[in-house]
Amino acid sequence: MIKKAVHHLFVLLFVTFSVQAQEKVTVYDTYDDFATNILIEDENIYVINFWATWCAPCIKELPYFEKLNAENKNVKVILVSLDSKKDLDKKLIPFIDKRKLKSKVLLLADKDYNSWLSKVDADWSGAIPATLLLNRKKKQFAERDFENFDELNQYVNSFINLK
């Protein structure tokens, strides 16, 4: 009886944690699923940052994207993690919690990089951090890190002001 109760408690805790993890991070197993649901060319301006928890330059610039998300209401910031799917619960979710990230976080789990990198940008080598700015009328890609918030904000605002 106790063994059965412990098992049910374990299952309940596991399901609860899994649901919480899914609320924090949307997982896309393939690039095509990601592109269909996220790379929407509408009137919104999307700032899509490709990063990973193991990438020091990525981690350094995350606060700039968080500030952009909070302060620039003209854009929608999406943080696309390229971490391994097996690290979702042990690394990515704790990373998000520790840094109290408010931007939308996705996990792109498609590790067949050669099949999709050029779909993001023809010249992307695969290096991160990398940032895609996108709306219905235009697209701009930067395979680089930003040194500070002002540099990122100027980059995004120059995109917004492009005719």
Image (cartoon, rainbow, N blue to C red):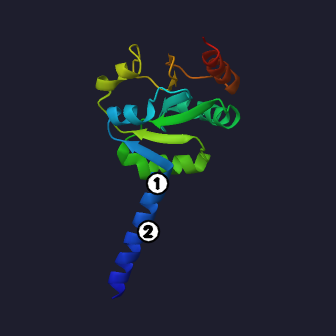
Q: Position of residue 73 (x, y in %)?
A: 67, 33
As drawn, 94 above or below 77: below
Q: Earlier in the sequence, mark 1 or mark 2?
A: 2
Q: Is residue 163 left or right of residue 52?
A: right
As drawn, 67 above or below 136: below
Which residue lies most toward the top here? Answer: 163
Which residue lies most toward the front here? Answer: 43
| Numbered circles on residues, count | 2
Question: Quadrant of the image for the C terminus?
Answer: top right
Q: Residue at position x 43%, y 68% from top? A: 13
Q: Nearer the viewer, residue 90 or 32?
A: 32
SS of the residue at dot 2? helix
Amino acid carrying label 2: it is Leu
Q: Position of residue 85 (x, y in %)?
A: 36, 44
SS of the residue at dot 1? helix
Report which residue position mark 1 lands on.
21
Question: Quadrant of the image for the N terminus?
Answer: bottom left
Q: Position of residue 41 (x, y in %)?
A: 47, 26
Amino acid carrying label 1: it is Ala
Q: Position of residue 116 (x, y in %)?
A: 33, 25
Q: CA distance from mark 1 to mark 2?
A: 12 Å
As drawn, 89 above or below 128: below
Badge 1: few (under 14), some or many (20 or more) residues near its Cα, within 10 Å?
A: some
Q: Which mark is residue 13?
A: 2
